[in-house]
């Protein structure tokens, strides 16, 4: 994809937290977890500061960790319906209902219109900021539901990366877009500028202040995966 743009980063939660908070105070966005879901629902956050996985990598690999679409808060996410018995897919309508997820992970029994939920959440601070969004269709059968940039051209992708399994290993992350959409390109530029503010450039990576300190302390800076030779790790020249 000659059209794609990507910024590679090494960052911890401490590196990302203040910068995401500043960005979110200036630009109203939401984060939708990319995945192939078994039902017409998906994980969504109004702030990544509320996501427990920020700054952690659970796979030891730079492309299989948690990845999010970043979109404007009023953008209606589209998912692709993937029939499991046929190698084809089709877009289904934008999703409009929200199921609130409580502290214990239980969803509300009755969906609320997404717009109403977002309006009501403005005054709730960090409470109830994680929701599962549901399509109006309830048929699941042999269908999987794909949330990716393919059906959402106004989005950008964010794979934060982070420390792997509490080991002295920091796996890289990425900010990117493969879309030609002006909205996507504008959001990409603003997000990269905010998130990497104060980072240093080492090779082709932007490295946060704490990440650089960990690098100096001997942490592996994994650019591919923990099983790859250490010669591929990021090092200072």
Image (tube, rainbow, N blue to C red):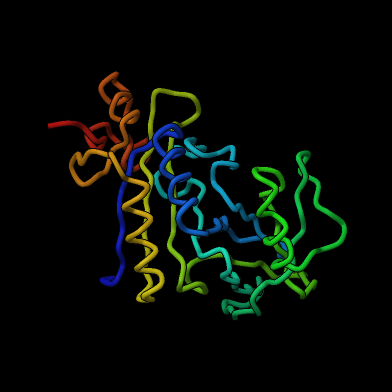
In the rendered image, which quarter contains the N terminus?
bottom left
Q: Residue at x 44, y 59 (%)?
A: 157
Say which of 11 and 49 sits in front. Answer: 49
Pick out the residue farthest to the top.
217
- In the image, 165: left or right of 10? right
**Relative to 105, is 191 above or below?**
below
In the rendered image, which quarter contains the C terminus?
top left
Say which of 40 and 98 sits in front. Answer: 98
Pick out the residue farthest to the right.
109
Q: Please state the horizontal and vertical placement of residue 191, each as a whole percent of the image.
A: 38, 55
**Relative to 108, is 172 above or below?**
above
Q: Residue at x 46, y 34 (%)?
A: 13
Number of marks present in the image shown: 0
**Relative to 109, is 164 above or below?**
above
- In the image, 126: left or right of 65? right
Q: Please state the horizontal and vertical placement of residue 120, each as a whole percent of the image.
A: 72, 58
Residue 109 figure quarter = bottom right
Residue 99 figure quarter = bottom right
- In the image, 8: left or right of 50? left
Q: Please state the horizontal and vertical placement of residue 231, each as a whole percent of the image.
A: 22, 34
- In the image, 115: left or right of 158? right
Q: Please state the horizontal and vertical placement of residue 92, each as a whole percent of the image.
A: 65, 79
Q: Residue at x 41, y 43 (%)?
A: 19
Say which of 211 and 225 sits in front. Answer: 211
Pick out the residue farthest to the front.
123
């Amino acid at each position: 994809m000659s059209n794609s743009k990507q910024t590679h980063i090494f960052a911890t939660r401490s590196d990302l937290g203040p910068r995401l908070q500043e960005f979110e105070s200036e630009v109203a966005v939401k984060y939708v977890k990319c995945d192939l879901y078994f039902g017409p629902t998906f994980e969504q956050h109004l702030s990544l500061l509320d996501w427990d996985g920020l700054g952690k990598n659970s796979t030891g690999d730079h492309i299989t960790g948690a990845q999010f679409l970043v979109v404007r808060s009023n953008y209606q996410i589209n998912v692709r319906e993937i029939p499991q018995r046929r190698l084809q897919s089709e877009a289904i309508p934008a999703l409009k209902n929200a199921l609130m997820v409580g502290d214990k992970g239980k969803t509300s029994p009755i969906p609320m219109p997404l717009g109403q939920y977002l309006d009501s959440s403005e005054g709730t601070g960090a409470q109830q900021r994680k929701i599962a969004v549901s399509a109006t269709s309830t048929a699941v059968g042999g269908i999987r539901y794909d949330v990716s940039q393919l059906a959402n051209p106004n989005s950008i992708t964010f794979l934060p990366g982070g420390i792997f399994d509490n080991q002295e290993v920091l796996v890289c992350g990425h900010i990117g877009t493969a879309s030609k959409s002006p909205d996507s390109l504008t959001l990409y530029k603003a997000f990269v500028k905010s998130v990497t503010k104060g980072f240093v450039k080492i090779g082709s990576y932007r490295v946060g202040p704490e990440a650089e300190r960990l690098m100096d302390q001997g942490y592996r800076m994994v650019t591919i995966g923990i099983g790859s030779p250490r010669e591929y790790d990021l090092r200072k020249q």
